Image (cartoon, rainbow, N blue to C red):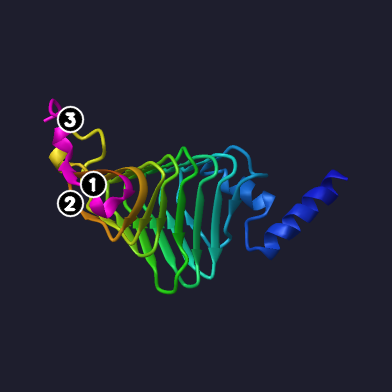
Amino acid sequence: MQDKIIGLMDEHRRRNAFLTLAEMAALAGTNTVFDPFSTLIARDAVIGEGNTFFPGVVVQCDGGTISIGSGNAFYPSTLVIAANGGRIDIGDACSLGPGGVQIKANQPGSVLSVGNRARLLNGAEIVGSSVIGDGAQIIGAIAAQSVQLAGGDDFTGPDPDHRGAVLKGAGLARGTRLQAGDVVNGLGDFAAATVERQLAYHPRSK
């Protein structure tokens, strides 16, 4: 009976272009997969090593391409989907979650890039052709559409002026472009929010 159930689950996975349970076990040879039953990884996704996949993570290629580096943490309920010719590239040592992060390149020709050591937390949703540079952060329930956040050091960097750009708060950030060391703390429409320098938040770090 157990073999039959697993066989049915694998058949559903194959039909939707996800790795089977046996293939998930093989993936776990070089990555940490806490629960292969609740984790769905696209067969066509390119996955590095040392990544951690928590339960409920979905990485889906639906007519798109996804490339994931190494040493990333995908927290519960993270969704990464490339569809309709879209492309997603995720670097190394990123934190996706906790908080149900969504990364979607689901429009024809859309390219979404997440650099190394980026942090996307607490319900962040990134769509469209966007660039999240090295060390950049999106913190909060922010719908980031076609944004460009310049890269730099990660949040532990000693000089805030050299850290990746940051979006904080909740609401809609459409077309936002920030330089290294910039931070926008918004609520609602981020177009009306003030661009500040991270040094103002961390005056003793410099």
Label whose residue precedes the other's in the sequence (2 or 1): 1
Q: Quick one: SS at disc 3? A: loop
Question: In the rendering, which numbered label is found on residue 202?
Answer: 3
- Residue 169, how many percent across, how many down? 34, 41
For marks 3 and 1, give the CA distance.
Answer: 14 Å
Left or right: 162 as drawn, with respect to 125: left
Given residues 43 and 161, the one toward you in this image is 161
For marks 3 and 2, give the CA distance.
Answer: 17 Å
The reply to whether residue 181 is in sight is no
Which residue is labeled 2 in the image?
179
**Which residue: 23% across, 50% down?**
151
What amino acid type should be assigned to the residue bearing mark 2? Gln
- Residue 33, how many percent across, how many down? 57, 41
Q: Quick one: SS at disc 1? A: loop
User: Quarter holding the C terminus?
Assistant: top left
Above or below — where is 65 with respect to 120? below
Q: Are marks 3 and 2 in contact (CB under 8 Å)?
A: no
Say if the magenta span includes residue 62. no
**Which residue: 84% across, 51% down?**
4
What amino acid type should be assigned to the residue bearing mark 3? His
Label whose residue precedes the other's in the sequence (3 or 1): 1
Question: In the rendering, which numbered label is found on residue 165?
Answer: 1
Q: Quadrant of residue 61?
A: bottom right
Label whose residue precedes the other's in the sequence (3 or 2): 2
What amino acid type should be assigned to the residue bearing mark 1? Ala
Q: Are marks 2 and 1 in contact (CB under 8 Å)?
A: yes
Left or right: 155 as drawn, with respect to 72: left
For marks 2 and 1, give the CA distance.
Answer: 6 Å
Q: Quick one: SS at disc 2? A: loop
Left or right: 162 as drawn, with respect to 115: left
Given residues 189 and 117, the one toward you in this image is 189
The span shown in magenta is 187-206
